[in-house]
Every structure is written in structure tokens, then in C-alpha cells.
Amino acid sequence: MSKPLLTIDWHITQKCNQTCMHCYAAGEQFREEATPRKTVRIVDKILSLKNDFNIKVTLTGGEPLLRADVFEIASSLSENNVPISLTTNGMLVQKNIDKIINSGIMQIQVSIDGMRSVHNYLRGSNTFDSAIHALRLLKKEHLLPSVMTTVNGYNFKQVPEIIALVRGMNIPLFRYTAIRAHRQGRRSQEPCSNTGKLQRPHGIYYEQKRRVKR
């Protein structure tokens, strides 16, 4: 009898090198990272579940690549045959590509939140080119890249273009999520989170999702 799948999203840091208008993490009070001792306990707890579940772990943030021991965490799990994914904005992928490969991380999810001008508006100058470069490098190194889009009031009309970009780069997986409203520091998310505008992208995504996988 096959074991049920258990997927774990481990938020390993609140630190980030971008200030995205729509980011839920930036709107929350900073939480300290787990101490080395607590991190070991978390890893041990995850591994203890292997007898009952097929486990997959995604390391998230913030920007996970800003955590000093991210590759130690990934290695401690991958060496015990736990598949590891990581979410990133892409800015630190080139700097860390050898460590990513050696740590056993299997899948890297890169955020693309619009075409160049919209993505840069939401995430900061030159962030679009950094994300695209990261995706190309991951493909070159035969890793499994994927794209995540946070659909909001600024980028919902660009969803078909983003999907076309993903297809054109032969990225095997595209995901999206709808924004949830909150306030982040100096910039409010209210213009991003028009739920009326978000009804249409759901239809666009499901219509074209099949085409990406062909």
C-alpha cells in the first residue's frame, strides 16, 4: 500500500532583497529565524514522518537564499531521500548555482509577476532580467525550474503573455496564486487586490494550462 503524500512548505526566513508591493511576508512583523538547534529538531521531525508519508519539502521565505544555512538544511533532507524545492526571486541564483546543485535541491520556483515593466514596477528595477537569467541558468544546469505568478490588479491582463513566455522558454511548470489584501509598510496593497479583476485570470490560466504541458 502506497503512503500518502505530505507536502511541507517551510518558511525558513523573513529576510528578502526585494520590496514587492504584493508580498504578504513584508507586511508581517519580522520573525527571527530558527536557531541551529531548533533547525535540527525541525529536520529530525520531518524525517520522522517518512515511515508514514511520502514527503516533499519546499523551502520558502522571504528569500530563502538569504539564509546562511539554507544549503545545510537542503542537504540534510535530500541526503535522506526527501525531495526539496525552493522558491526564489532569482537574484541570487547565479551566485549560488554550485551550492544549489550540490545541496540536492530538485526544483527551483522563480517568481515572474508580469512582463518587464510591470514586474519591475511590482518588485524593483532590473528584477525581471534577473529572474529570466535565473531560469535560463537553471535550465542550462539541467535543474527543474518553474514559474510562479502572483496575479493582481496590475498584471492580470498579462497572464497570457506570461504563459507564452513560459512556453517559449520550455519551462515545464507554471503556477499562479491570487493576491490576498493587506498593508505592507509604506505601500498599500489595495490597488493590487481588486478581486473583481481576478475573476478573469482564473479562466485564462485553466484554458492555457494544458498548452504549457504539451
Image (spheres, grey):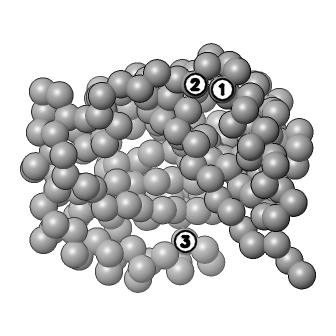
Kind of residue indicated by mark 1: Lys
Mark 2 or mark 3, which has the lower sequence index? 2
Circle 1 is placed at which residue position?
38
Q: Is there a contact, CB below 8 Å, between mark 3 and mark 1?
A: no
Circle number at residue 212: 3
Q: Can you tell which quarter of the image residue 92 is in? A: top right
Q: Is the residue 34 above or below the residue 161 in the image?
A: above
Q: Can you tell which quarter of the image residue 15 is in? A: top left
Circle 2 is placed at which residue position?
34
Q: Is the residue 32 above or below the residue 110 in the image?
A: above
From the viewer's side, name the closer residue of 157 and 18: 18
Could you tell me residue 63's position as x and y percent? 49, 30
Q: Image point 41% across, 82% down: which residue?
A: 207
Q: Image point 82% across, 49% down: which residue?
A: 48
Kind of residue indicated by mark 3: Val
Q: Image point 82% across, 64% down: which residue?
A: 52
Cα separation between marks 3 and 1: 40 Å
Mark 3 or mark 1, which has the lower sequence index? 1
* Mark toward the viewer: 2 or 3: 2
Q: Is there a contact, CB below 8 Å, between mark 2 and mark 1?
A: yes
